[in-house]
Image (spheres, helix red, strand yellow):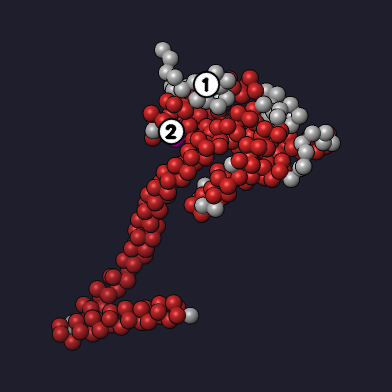
Amino acid sequence: MNQTRWYTILAASLIAASAVSYLTQIVLFQRTEDTFFYMLQDIAFVPIQVLLVTLILNQLLSSRERRALMKKLNMLIGTFHIEAGAELIRRCSAFTGDLNEIRRQLNVDPRWTSREFHAAAAFVKGRDLRIDSRSGDLNSLKALLESKRHFLLSLLANPNLLEHDSFTDLLWAVFHLAEELSARKSLDGLPRVDYDHLSGDIKRAYAQLLVEWLYYMKHLKEDYPYLFSLAVRMNPLDPEADAVVKG
């Protein structure tokens, strides 16, 4: 109510100030017709001002602010991949039956352009990944997710990440997988239908991990080539990944 009252007072004050200015002009120069002529000209220009300020300038400023925000978000996303994402990709890869094809398609090369990154992401999104929760070490995956629980919670608590829908979805998928694994006292000897359920949870998290990793790699190549060089050498899908520069 106080804010509404403040806006009302401000609007009334501005209108009164304008009225006083016009009345002063009429009294001093005695040219009523000219005053109303220029008043109508000013009013006629108001829609153009609205177009320039509200639509064009506001859009430009919003776009600039969004780019600045995305740059900060990419720092958070980079922290995720360094702290947990890369290792999660390695652990989840043990559950997929088409790992060789995934490695071939996602073998990021320093010469890749935006086209290759988008093509690789489209491959992951369009492929029905074959995940079997019985083919890998669920206990190892569970231990990793539990060790990263507080880190994941801190990311979810960051309000800025609400601006990045796909990465937020990834965090929820990973966090849900962590909850599913932690909720079971034992991951051995589960019913087949329960293993199938866990396969679906791993598949959801793994697919989103791969896509977001590709977008992160694309960001590094465009903005931080020196970080991209190391990230290529440490590709989590490459079993022979090594930070040492060879040849």
Res 99 seen here: yes
Whether the magenta-drawn stretch holds residue 219 is answered as yes
Q: Kindly identify which residue carries mark 1.
A: 241
Q: Is residue 114 left or right of residue 52?
A: right
| Depicted 180 relative to depicted 243: above or below | below
Q: Position of residue 58 (x, y in %)?
A: 38, 57
**Residue found farthest to the top:** 247
Residue at 65% in and 23% down: 99
Residue 220 badge: 2
Residue type at numbered disc 1: Ala
| Depicted 172 relative to depicted 202: above or below | below
Q: Position of residue 62 (x, y in %)?
A: 40, 53
User: Pointer 2: residues within 10 angstroms few (<14), some, or many (20+)?
Assistant: some
Mark 2 element type: helix
| Depicted 178 relative to depicted 237: above or below | below
How far apart marks 1 and 2 lie (CA) works out to 18 Å
